[in-house]
Amino acid sequence: MQSPTSEPLPVLDFRSAARATLKLLQQRCAMTLWMLARAEGDDDDWIVLDAEDRGYGLKQGDILHWSKSACSRLMKGQGPRCVPDLNQLLCAEPRAEPAADEGDAPVVASYIGVPLVYGDGSLFGTLCAISPTPQSPQLINDLPMIELMASMLSALLVAELRVSVESRSADNARSLATRDELTGLFNRRGWDEILALEESRCERYGSPACVFSIDLDSFKDINDTQGHDAGDEYLRAAARVLAQASRASDLIARVGGDEFAILAVEANPAAGELLAYRLREAFAAAGVGASLGFVPRSGTSLQTTWKLADEAMYDDKRSRRAVRVPA
């Protein structure tokens, strides 16, 4: 063990508390890597929210795909929370998979980790450490302290997330300057503000999100042949479809003449696919033609993700036009 050699970091919120916790644990316990990681949906992925790394090369924002490794199984409670020598554990369990590399899994010879949980007890992520070399059996003595730290981080996380939900609701109800007068949705100004606010939440908590870009078909033709009143009603009909098919937490905006966008918060790729299906079905049922593209946020900002979603939307528009044109 090592003694702390620096002044404690100030703790102002979950992020700074996590940073201070990792720094203290790195000083106290001679593990190569201490990290806070968030479990990502049902895909067995882990997003690194913060890390004190002395050899693995992991950093904030990295995604770990090591669902079959022994370390990942221990994270899920399929073994003890503290293993000073993983090789001894594997020798005691002949059916266990090796601790060495599996795909992009890091080499792990010792492990300690405890869960962070939401208010309902479901898994948020883990506070954990790994090392490529076995550690002293005395490592187990630090487990109660680490469990206490994880419990305190969980309580702080739950409190912050509650405030975050309330803050998002307040953001959604803010001034008319961010609303589109015709549809009642957010306008482009409101949309840009939403992306900036949600980007900070995604960075802090590793929250998943999907961005949708929607462009209406035939809007110009309707304006030209039936008049602007008919065009306005077409836009309002599209807005109703978006509001009815989306989840209550999704943020919807009219970002251009006949262009709309949706930010699906806390939505992984599978949730994005489901929402895309609902939107397409709802547009078809309402008789509103629309091209749609969506992209999950993954290693890029929400603004960049929106641009990628816009490109996907134009790909969808081109493919739908190709289907309609006779050979």
Image (spheres, grey):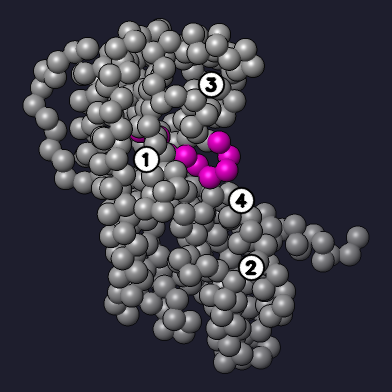
* Residue tagged 2: 279
Sequence-earlier tag: 3 or 1 = 3
Question: Marks 4 and 3: in contact by CB < 8 Å?
Answer: no
Q: Residues within 10 Å of mark 3 (few under 14, many from 20)?
A: many
Give the residue at x 49% y 8%: 88
**Dot 2, how many residues are within 10 Å of its Cα: few (below 14), some (14-19), or many (20+)?**
many
Q: Secondary structure at mark 1?
A: strand
Reading the image, the residue beneath label 4 is 270
Kindly identify which residue carries mark 1. Answer: 116
| Cα–Cα gap, marks 3 and 4 | 26 Å
Q: Position of residue 151 (x, y in %)?
A: 29, 40
Which residues lie in the magenta part?
Answer: 36-44
Of the numbered discs 1 and 4, the one sitting upstream in the chain is 1
Q: Are marks 3 and 1 in contact (CB under 8 Å)?
A: no
Residue on which the image places disc 3:
70
Q: Is residue 307 left or right of residue 279?
A: left
Figure disc tally? 4
What is the x, y in percent for residue 80?
A: 44, 24
Q: Regarding mark 4 in the picture, which secondary structure is present there?
A: helix
Residue 270 falls inside the magenta stretch: no
Taking depth in this image into account, of 148 and 217 the one nearest to the observer is 148
Q: Nearer the viewer, mark 3 or mark 4?
A: 3
Q: Earlier in the sequence, mark 3 or mark 4?
A: 3
